[in-house]
Amino acid sequence: MAGATQHTSVERHMELQPANKPRIGALILTAAPVTALGVVAGVAAGMEPLACAPVALVLGLALGVLVAGATGVAPPVEPAADAPHTFGVRALLTRVAHDVRPVLEGVEVLVDVAPPRLRTVGDPESLHRAVAELIAQAARRSPPGGIVTLAARAAPSGVRLEVLDEGTGDCSAGLDLARRIVDRHGGALRAEPARPQGCRVVVELPG
């Protein structure tokens, strides 16, 4: 059953890859006649058909693979994942705030970006995950009815993002995922107490 399942999955994969069909055709059209000619040549040289057939088949398949590889049909190119590009910081933070709001319990998220057209560079989807995680940690520390503020400003290094809350607790807890993403973007992340209370997580990103 395992073999049958594997064979079926391979067949489905081939059906879903149109670029493979010309290669398969070239392989068959080349291997079949070459194998037949190999058997005929072997018989003419005095060999038994069953003895020369395996050798002829191997040669036919080898030549078929070479011809199939030279058909010039390339598989479709997958788009590059996580390709960095510039994007608006306000749009990113507004989208994150909107996406996480349904799961927050009695905590409001405010977005404050200046200048309004502030931009950064990187993968917006990865940074979306990082900011969402920072908001979630800030909300866990916040009291009912608390406010989490996402503030972004231009900085010498590019963009300075601050996630501020009004709660209590360990400001450095739960930052591993966000820190890894920020590090991959060439930025830096640190946590510090805010005044008069709460935590401030500062993210420096390239501009």
Image (spheres, rainbow, N blue to C red):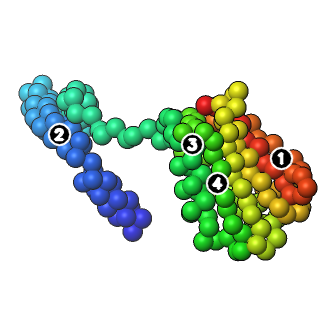
Q: Mark 2 points at which residue?
A: 22
Q: Which of marks 1 and 2 is nearer the N terminus?
A: 2
Going by the numbered disc 3, the residue's amino acid type is: Pro
Between circles 1 and 2, the one closer to the viewer is: 1
Residue visible at 82% across and 70% down in the picture = 143
Going by the numbered disc 2, the residue's amino acid type is: Pro
Label number found at residue 191: 1
Residue 72 is at least partly visible in this image: yes
CA gap, disc 1 and disc 2: 57 Å
Q: Which of marks 2 and 3 is nearer the N terminus?
A: 2
CA gap, disc 2 and disc 3: 53 Å
Question: Residue 99 at what x, y percent from top left?
Answer: 56, 63
Going by the numbered disc 1, the residue's amino acid type is: Ala
Q: Earlier in the sequence, mark 4 or mark 3?
A: 4
Res 147 → quadrant: bottom right
Between circles 4 and 2, the one closer to the viewer is: 4
- The number of numbered badges drawn on the structure is 4
Between circles 2 and 3, the one closer to the viewer is: 3
Residue visible at 72% across and 56% down in the picture = 149
Q: What element carries label 4?
A: strand
Between circles 1 and 4, the one closer to the viewer is: 4
Instruction: Establish if 184 lies above or below 132.
Output: above
Label 4: few (<14), some (14–19) or many (≥20) C-alpha neighbours in 10 Å:
some
Q: Are marks 1 and 4 in contact (CB under 8 Å)?
A: no
Question: Residue 135 at what x, y percent from top left?
Answer: 70, 58
Q: Name the residue under label 4.
A: 111
Q: Using residue 111 as the reference point, say whether residue 57 is left or right of it.
A: left
- Residue sticking out furthest to the front: 115
Instruction: Establish if 14 lies above or below 8.
Output: above
Q: Name the residue under label 3.
A: 116
Q: Earlier in the sequence, mark 1 or mark 4?
A: 4
